[in-house]
């Protein structure tokens, strides 16, 4: 929302707060770290961890004696597995946030290390479970937020043409600037020319 507000301030001037809790300004970071979203996500993450535990126990080639503690102490899931209020909310530096942004962290891949004979099996387990986790998070947080945003745009009568009209209108009212400062390369001898052979 912060990007849309920056590009089209008058179209979105009345709606800068979180679509779920209306308590903080919505940004790309706060969307995934909103306390209300995290609480909505909590039972789904707990269920995911239970399913992950069952899957690893059924498919692993080696012992899984530390699996329970590995999952409970894993920094991605720890906030969700602990009772409410025991741990601070995840931040942009946390493994959970990196996971939400679709970065496979060491914390996630470590769960599968030493459990399978073949690297290919380990890699496939990491990728398939990571995909399942990120899709779960998107389905629980992003999808409802996106649906609410679309309904709001319809109610406000904001369409694709609204964005185009806004750009045309603001470009006409913007004062002319000296475009020579925007040239990347002032030296004509170092220009690059492309030719087709």
Image (spheres, rainbow, N blue to C red):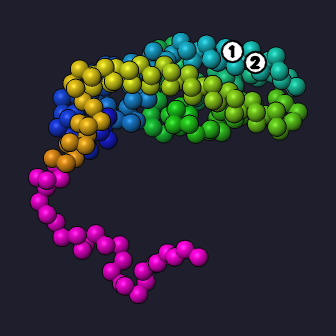
- Position of 15 with respect to 105 (left or right) is left
**Which span is picked out in magenta?**
170-197
Q: Residue at x 14, y 63 (%)?
A: 176
Label 1's element?
helix
- Residue identified by numbered label 2: 55
Q: Position of residue 32 (x, y in %)?
A: 43, 29
Taking the magenta stretch, the answer to whether it contains residue 182 is: yes
Task: Name the image quarter holding residue 129.
Answer: top right
Q: Position of residue 31 (x, y in %)?
A: 39, 29
The majority secondary structure of the magenta stretch comes to loop
Q: Residue at x 32, y 31 (%)?
A: 26
- CB under 8 Å between callouts 1 and 2? yes
Within-10-Å neighbours for mark 1: few <14, some 14–19, many 20+: few
- Position of 50 with respect to 8 (left or right) is right
Task: Name the image quarter holding residue 182.
Answer: bottom left
> Does residue 65 appear anywhere in the picture?
no
Q: Residue at x 39, y 25 (%)?
A: 146
- Residue identified by numbered label 1: 51
């Amino acid at each position: 929302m912060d990007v849309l507000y920056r590009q089209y301030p008058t179209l979105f001037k009345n709606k800068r707060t979180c679509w779920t809790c209306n308590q903080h300004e919505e940004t790309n970071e706060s969307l995934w770290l909103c306390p209300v979203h995290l609480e909505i996500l909590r039972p789904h993450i707990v269920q995911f961890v239970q399913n992950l535990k069952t899957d690893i126990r059924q498919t692993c080639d080696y012992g899984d004696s530390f699996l329970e503690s590995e999952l409970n102490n894993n920094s991605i899931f720890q906030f969700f597995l602990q009772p409410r209020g025991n741990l601070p909310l995840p931040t942009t530096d946390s493994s959970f946030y990196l996971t939400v942004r679709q970065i496979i962290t060491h914390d996630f891949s470590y769960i599968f290390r030493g459990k399978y004979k073949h690297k290919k099996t380990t890699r496939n387990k990491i990728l398939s479970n990571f995909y399942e986790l990120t899709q779960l998070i998107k389905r629980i947080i992003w999808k409802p937020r996106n649906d609410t945003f679309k309904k709001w745009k319809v109610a406000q009568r904001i369409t694709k043409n609204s964005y185009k009209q806004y750009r045309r209108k603001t470009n006409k009212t913007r004062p002319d600037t000296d475009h020579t400062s925007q040239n990347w390369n002032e030296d004509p001898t170092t220009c690059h020319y492309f030719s087709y052979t």
